Amino acid sequence: MDVIVTDNLTKSYASGWPGRPPFVALDGLCLTVRRGEIFGFLGPNGAGKTTTLKILLGLVRPTSGQAYLLGQPAGDVATRRRIGFLPESPYFYDYLTAEEFLGFYGQLAGLNRAAINQRVTDLLGLVGLTEARARQLRKFSKGMLQRVGLAQALIHDPELIILDEPMTGLDPVGRKQVRDLILSLRDCGKTVFFSTHILHDVEMICDRVGIVMKGRLVASGRVDELVRQDHTQSVEVVCQQLNVEGNAFIHSLATRVLQQGPQCLIVLPSPDAVDALVGEIRRQGGRLLSVTPHKASLEDLYFQEATQQGAQPLPYMISGRAS
Amino acid sequence: MGAIGVIALNAFRESLRDKILYNLVLFAGLLIGLSVLLADLSITEHHKVIADMGLAAINLIGVIIAIFVGISLVNKEIERRTIYTIMARPISRAAFVLGKYLGLTLTLFVNMTIMVAVFLLTLWLYHVPIQFSMFQAVLLIFVEIVVVTAVALFFSTFSSTTLSAIFTLGFYVIGHLTADLRTVVANSDSGPVTSLVDLLYYLCPNLEMLNIKGQAAVGIVAAPEYVMMASLYGLMYAGVLLTGACLIFQQRDF
């Protein structure tokens, strides 16, 4: 069963100036998320990820098109009992302690006092904040806020968890904890839909991904399928005792050549040119050290789409490292 | 407890933790300090002056809090984006607006109860007789504060904090002048001026109807029917504004 379905979802905002065209945040987005999967929603800043999430949660109304969550129209109040949500860079009531904060959201979800107490204890343990239970959120670090925000999204044990950039602000240990948590949620039969621009996380944990650019879904499917469909592999060749300076033939084959002392790294765009390169290395008296096929990644696909759409990816998208 | 109650109690807790009730220190200082000063300066009517001063201080501080907390009640949630996680819960937007409103009203009620206690203590200290009329005046002050809070909340659902403050202050001032303005222009030959004043008269709340401080300070008891009708009028006006606030908030994108 599909848990999230969007059909030709469009959202445009008036420019505020007469004669100027409206800003189109979403342009006919069609997306499907299946029950029990982890779905990564990828895209650069301003691509329409957060707008999509807001429409799904009823925070924003679409200009046209439909969206359904758990079989009900997006924004349906009763359906929200089955959904957990963590916004990007969450801002919470910082005058509350972690315990009060989770209790408040538990009450809003309609849980009774005993259930709230139990869930608060369990979730604070799960996100590693047991010792900060009685501390006000204004004294929390960014990473701690992210974790208590995750606990808030899970307080009522929802079927569908929607997370907007859940890894933002976390250190490597925190990111791993969140990744593990998302995987354990899937193991419990939950559906996790999260937006991100950190490709590494997506590749590691997502069953399926969707890439959104300029408000349109440009690719969707399993990571391995997407990568296999669209990319040829590159090959890294390392050799010694070879000076590639001035070797026009090698430069014509390679996409990248790096000379570091006696060693030389040559990157070929596809395996087709390996034989020609190895022959040339031998002819020049060089010593071959390694030939490594470089598996095409989601990053490559992402960049291909970004380039086609004319987007200018930022450095942190390239590296896949959270800022 | 329903969602409205949960939101209301949280809004009340927010007020307490944001130390809004610290204004009471200002109130006590203002009331006791001025009472000491004026009791010494006035020769014959210092009982009336102290009672008048106390009721005016209760009114002023209540209205200031109602306006300045009321205008940020909803806007702050949107600007700080705390509303995202609240609206992702199974509660309606109307329940959120009403909960926030009731939370502030509860804060104002507690605030006012303490101010009245300090006021009565001051009266007792200066041997001023405590009259029933003073309690009537306090009741209508509270109704006025309920109306002003609703006005502030109404404007904050569709305008910025600054504009909401300007509109609410405008409503408050005009609300105290509508009856006088109407009397002044009653004999005017200018049709547009009369129409404008008529429009303001029917649009703005008649807050002067809720002001019986002057007579209460000298012990003149208002007719119970008047107090009841005035209270009912104020509560209905607030109800209409809250309905409007809920309807507007329902249409907003966040």
Image (cartoon, coloured by chain):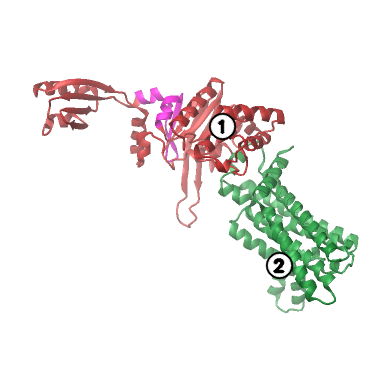
x 51%, y 41%: residue: A89
Q: Do the residues labelled 2 and 1 touch (CB within 8 Å)?
A: no
Give x and y (percent) for residue A305.
36, 35
Q: Which of marks 2 and 1 is in front?
A: 1
Q: In this view, does B33 lie to the left or right of B68?
A: right
Give x and y (percent) for residue A7.
52, 34
How busy is the neighbourhood of tag 2: few (under 14 within 10 Å), some, or many (20 plus)?
many
Reading the image, the residue beneath label 2 is B174
**Which image quarter is the N terminus of chain B in?**
top right
Q: Which chain is green?
A: B
- The magenta segment is A199-228
Instruction: Kindly identify the amino acid type of the residue bearing the numbered disc 1.
Output: Leu
Report which colour depicts chain A. Answer: red
A102 part of magenta stretch = no
Reading the image, the residue beneath label 1 is A129
Give x and y (percent) for residue A37.
51, 24
In depth, the one of B122 and A2 nearer the eye is B122
- Say yes or no: labels 2 and 1 on the same chain: no
In depth, the one of B97 and B19 nearer the eye is B19
x 83%, y 72%: residue: B46
Q: Is residue B226 left or right of residue B151?
A: right
Give the chain letter at badge 1: A
Give x and y (percent) for residue A93.
60, 43
The image quarter in which residue A69 lies: top right
Local secondary structure at mark 1? loop
Instruction: Kindly identify the amino acid type of the residue bearing the numbered disc 2.
Output: Ile
Give the chain letter at badge 2: B
